Image: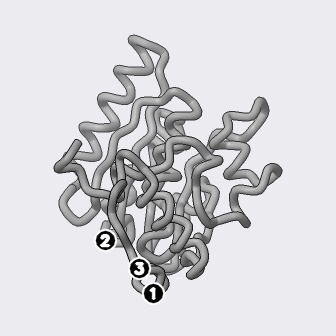
Amino acid sequence: MANEPLASRQRPTRIEDVVGQTHLLRESAPLARLIRGDKGAAWSSVILWGPPGTGKTTLARLISSARKAHFDELSAISSGVSQVRDVIEAAKNRRALYDQSSVLFLDEIHRFSKSQQDALLGAVESGTLTLVAATTENPSFSVIKPLISRSLVLELQALTAAEVRQVLDKAIASDQGLRGLAAQPQALEW
């Protein structure tokens, strides 16, 4: 735990602890309903589009946790079609043997070529897995249209200064964070 990065130690495990993205997390919003696992909420793939540090990975984990789904995480920077196929095969087996859903969080999906993205399409269409993709690029230009048409596309917004301060204050007060750190108010504002 001591070697785990601060962001990972402080990652929210409940929707109520997420800072920012209130436009996506208000009670009636589709993402909030999906994360809470509301009865009748559409269980669909999601493309999270926004700047770094806005909570894309956290939201992917919350979606998976809400449905008690197996969670796999790949980065398009360091993964290829063979790793995607391995995840899809494992998801098929998990569903057949244990009736367990699977979520694939694919970070930086815009780094995948169109043909690499095509490798995901069959598994998304069949419900073999739920794709939660993250991108800092406009998905209209970087994600294939068949994936977009089968996904809930959500734009995340950069955290405001007040929200960043809230995250810092939580980290300073947390046993898993920076408890005991003395910080001058001017340093926190900066």
For disc 3, the marked residue is 184
Q: Quadrant of residue 110?
A: bottom left
Residue 162 on image: x %, y %: 60, 77
- Assign the N terminus to one quadrant of the image: top left
> Colour scheme used in the picture?
one colour
Q: What is the three-letter code of the residue carrying label 1?
A: Gln
Q: Earlier in the sequence, mark 1 or mark 2?
A: 2
Say which residue appears at 30% left-offset and 31% top-offset. 89
Locate residue 171 relative to residue 31 in the image: left or right.
left
Instruction: Describe the element under mark 1 as helix, strand or loop.
Output: helix
For disc 2, the marked residue is 111
The alpha-carbon separation of the residues under discs 3 and 1 comes to 5 Å
Packing grade of label 3 (10 A; few <14, some 14-19, many >=20) is few
From the image, state whether disc 1 or disc 2 is nearer to you.
1
Say which residue appears at 45% left-offset and 44% top-offset. 122
Q: Earlier in the sequence, mark 2 or mark 3?
A: 2
Which residue sits furthest top?
97
For disc 1, the marked residue is 186
The alpha-carbon separation of the residues under discs 1 and 2 comes to 38 Å
- Callouts 3 and 1 close, C-beta under 8 Å: yes
Q: What is the three-letter code of the residue carrying label 2?
A: Arg
Residue 45 on image: x %, y %: 56, 49
Residue 187 on image: x %, y %: 40, 84
Instruction: Describe the element under mark 2 as helix, strand or loop.
Output: helix
Residue closer to the observer: 118 or 132: 132
Residue 65 on image: x %, y %: 51, 34
- Assign the C terminus to one quadrant of the image: bottom left
Instruction: Describe the element under mark 3 as helix, strand or loop.
Output: loop
